[in-house]
Image (spheres, rainbow, N blue to C red):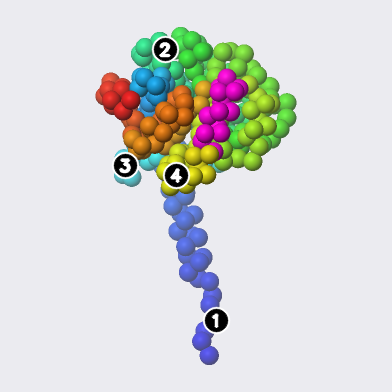
Amino acid sequence: MPPRPTGGGFVRDMDVAAQEKSLLEADFRKAIRLGELAVHYQPLIDLATGEVECYEALVRWHHPVRGMVMPDAFIGLAEEIGLIDVVGQFVLQSACREAMMWPAHVKLAVNVSPIQFRSPNLLGIVVQALSSAGMDPRRLELEITEAVLMEKGPQVSGMIASIRALGVGISMDDFGTGYSSLSYLLSYPFTKIKIDKSFVRDLHQEPNSQAVVRAIIGLGHSLGLTVTAEGIEEETVLDYLRGEGCAQGQGYLIGRARPANELGMTRAIAKDAG
């Protein structure tokens, strides 16, 4: 009779995962202290002219051993261990200072996680970053996902209203992937919606994606909102979005996220892509 499984392999795998997480946490805390985080910038262009209208600030971690670590690997950890406000403040302050080196018409977009948005410190962090950089609030856009809005209540509504009162724009990221996006557009003063890249990448393989993208663009026009398409990687997709009247585009075809000292190169790429 064969021996009964003990589950030892599963336990060992869990132990290895726990150790790896513990090491990553220790490394991340050290990264905060040593200044290993950096902000890169990805361009958003006017699809009609090809000109850069905005840069999205994206945080990167330059790990001395692992190399470049992308945010998917550490933002969740930062939220879990209570450091997301520290990371968010670093990104916002760094990006606002950098944006003051750009032409005055170029805006800055910064992502805000649901946990950041629920923090009562967020408004003060935004005000301090703008004031310290001397930046016009109208040049800043905060990008949020539907997860921020799922907890309906006065705290979220009040925070959005306070941020908009500053003149800062509010953009709904990953639009079209949630359950209540349409009702949110009526309930909150958004200034922009970003079509999720899953619809954009499938434009020429999935007819339903074309219908969704066309509907979102029309909805944005009707509500007076800027519509941005994420994940543009092919010229045919770029041409289709232009033809449908999409205002802005973002993606690898237009330009990848780059350090601040390479933005001159990024602007050239973005213009060529138009």
The answer to whether marks 1 and 4 mark residues whose Cβ atoms lie closer than 8 Å is no
Residue 199 position, x and y percent, is 49, 41
Quarter where residue 260 is shown: top left
Mark 1 lies on a secondary structure that is loop
Number of other residues with Cα within 10 Å of mark 1, as a class: few under 14, some 14 to 19, many 20 or more: few
**1 or 2: mark nearer the eye:** 2
**1 or 4: mark nearer the eye:** 4
Residue 222 lies left or right of residue 69; in this view the side is right
Residue 68 lies left or right of residue 142; in this view the side is left
Say which residue appears at 65% left-offset and 30% top-offset. 184
Instruction: Establish if 53 lies above or below 175.
Output: above
Residue placed under numbered mark 4 in the picture: 202
Quarter of the image with the C terminus in it: top left
Number of other residues with Cα within 10 Å of mark 2, as a class: few under 14, some 14 to 19, many 20 or more: few
- Residue 118 inside the magenta-drawn segment: no
Q: Earlier in the sequence, mark 2 or mark 3?
A: 3
